[in-house]
Amino acid sequence: MAWWRTLRSRLSPGTAPLRQYLLVWMIAPQLVLWVAAAFMSYQVALHHANLALDRSLYQSSRALARQVKPLGSGLLIDLPRAARDILETDPDEQVYYMVSSPPGQFILGNRVLPAPPGDLARAASGLDGEPRFYDDALKVDARRMGVRVVALYLAYGEADNPQTMLVQIAKSRVSRDALASRILGDIAIPLVLLVMAMSVGVWWGVRKGLAPLSRLQQAVGSRAPGDHNPIALGPVPEEVEVVVSALNDLLGRVQGSVASQRRFISDAAHQLRTPLAGLKSQTELALKATADPELKVRLQRVHESATRSAHLVNQLLTLARAEPESMDAMGQSRFDLHRLVQELTAELVPRALQARVDLGLAEDERPDDLPAPAAPCMVQGNALLIREALFNVIDNAIRYAGAGAEVTLSLHREGAQVCVRIDDTGPGIPEAHHEAVFRRFFRATHEGTGCGLGLAIVREIAERHGGSVQLASRMPQGLSVQVRLPLA
């Protein structure tokens, strides 16, 4: 059934949350014990209520037995009418009595009383005068009423003609049940409060006990993908400390493996730079020295491949420097981003002119909240890496915007951040590729000599400095790249 499967899933440590699993197994036994305690309390209350009722019935049966006296072989009934009225008209209880001579000779009282159970009658065969108590039901006015009955067997008559007298008195169980219910209520209410207090204590204890696991989850979940530093939670229980120690050991091994790969990439890139530079120089000399058109075409292709390979090596070195370990080694400083953008724009103007692209810094078209052109815009970070990130964005714009396009840089503040925006009027990038171009080695176009690492490097550097990079299409055509960094 569905409810049983749900319950089993809650009680299974492999599927249910640990907090829920612990609460179920700690609170459920309390509820079971509470039900058992309530049942036992009711039974105890019923027992004591029966004792009080049985004592009253026994006294009444002895008093009634004294009113029926043996006389020879018969009985003398000395029960005044007034005493009979008092016995039959109890204001709080309905009382029934009957005197008979077994096996069924009615003598006095109410005929509605049933005979005692067979085993009770057999147990009274000794006629010791001890009362026998039992629960039964009477049919009164077409309804059945529960009663508590006392049966008292007495012997009378001559020795040669012994006879038995049975005195029965029955009283309604209403008062007994009401007394038992009151006792149960007086016991159950404190039990409920106790169970509630214990449940709150258990919930608080479980919550407090699992708090280190919540801190561990937050510490792991809030980490950057490249952060392999040890997890520090402070004082934690031994069980959690073992898990933290295992995680730190794993992070250490991962950090060593990643660092080894990065060192290999960095060393390989460094080793490739010199032969590639030499290859470029030799192809340039060969192109100048040869007059064979076919050989020139082949040498030109070799030169382009060498140039592209050198660009890839430089990008790989930049990517390696953007990693956290390299950034920590390089250090950070406080510098003027506005001045850096000015210097970088001036440096790239010759390259833009060579590509017939109009490159400029929009100093005169800034919004009202921009600082004056000469005012500093201070950020905290590694100036060399941020310069490399902005260089990649501007270089991409010059490469792919096309001849006759315009590339415009602007700088403005956005609250606690500064945004460097690079707008171009080139063909742009389809919006479906705006996120994909930040993946390594992804190229939105096969034109040019790019290697698909430029924008990946830009995002890596920006995020390492607590910033972000976004692309937006311009109308009617073009692309806007926005690099945001926190102000110092």
Image (cartoon, rainbow, N blue to C red):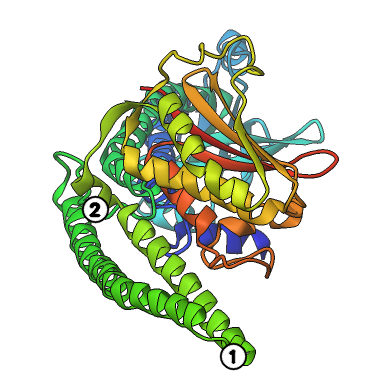
Please give left or right for residue 425 compared with residue 331 in the image. Answer: right
Residue type, numbered disc 1: Asp
Q: Which residue is mark 2?
A: 325
Asked where in the image residue 380 lies, by quadrant, the reply is top left
Lower sequence index among marks 2 and 1: 1
Q: Residues within 10 Å of mark 2 (few under 14, many from 20)?
A: some
Residue 192 in the image: state x and y as whole percent.
Answer: 42, 28
Residue under numbered circle 1: 292
Task: Point out the frontmost of discs 2 and 1.
Answer: 1
Is residue 176 at all visible to an observer of this figure?
Answer: yes
Question: Can residue 102 be seen at all in this image of the molecule?
Answer: no
The kind of residue on which mark 2 rests is: Glu
Q: Is residue 304 or residue 145 the one in the foreground?
A: 304
Q: How many marks?
A: 2
As helix, strand or loop, the secondary structure at mark 1 comes to loop
SS under mark 2:
helix
Q: Is residue 461 left or right of residue 259?
A: right
Compare residues 106 and 426 and report the one nearer the observer.
426
Q: Position of residue 302 (x, y in %)?
A: 51, 83
Closer-to-camera residue (329/421): 421
Which residue shows up at 37% across the image and 34% down it? 199
Residue situated in front as seen by the camera: 235 or 35: 235
In the picture, measured across the screen, residue 290 lies left or right of residue 138, that is left
* Above or below, 98 relative to 258: above
